[in-house]
Amino acid sequence: MGIANTQADRLIIAYEPIWAVGTDVVPESNEVMEVRILIRKILSELYSPELAERIPILYGGSV
């Protein structure tokens, strides 16, 4: 179940906190970095650290 390793290298992760969507509230850069680190850690556990490093993590899906 989920996304196979052979397809994971085509992933692009877009993150934006739910409380920031459609508002003028912007998270601090350290908050965005903490979530980026967490996402990268989860991707490393699901796949491999090498593959996780190749997956782009973008802030703001509507940018």
Image: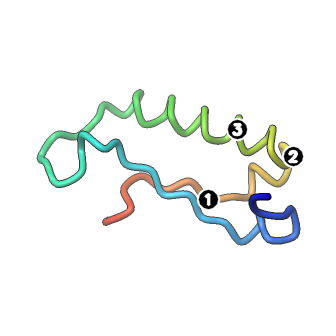
> Counting residues from the N terminus, which is met first, the one under dot 2 or under dot 1?
2
Q: Quadrant of residue 45?
A: top right
Dot 1, crowdedness within 10 Å: few (<14), some or many (≥20)? some
- Counting labels gives 3
Amino acid type of disc 3? Ile
Rendered view: 28 above or below 58: above
Q: Which residue is mark 1?
A: 56
**Residue 43 on image: x %, y %:** 73, 45
Please report the residue visible at 30 percent of the width from the left and 44 percent of the height from the top.
18
Q: Position of residue 55 (x, y in %)?
A: 69, 58
> Which residue is at 49% across, 34% downward?
33
Marks 3 and 1, how far apart in space?
14 Å
Residue 42 circle label: 3
Q: In the rendered structure, which amino acid carries the disc numbered 1?
A: Pro
- Between 56 and 21, the one nearer to me in the picture: 21
Q: Residue at x 84, y 64 (%)?
A: 4
Mark 2 burial class by Cα count in 10 Å: few <14, some 14-19, many 20+: few
* Side of 32 relative to 45 (left or right): left
For residue 6, the mark is none
Q: Mark 1: which secondary structure?
A: loop
Residue 10, image quadrant: bottom right
Tell me which amino acid carries mark 2.
Ser
N-term-proximal mark, 2 vs 3 = 3
Which residue is tagged 2? 48
Residue at position x 42%, y 52% in the image: 59
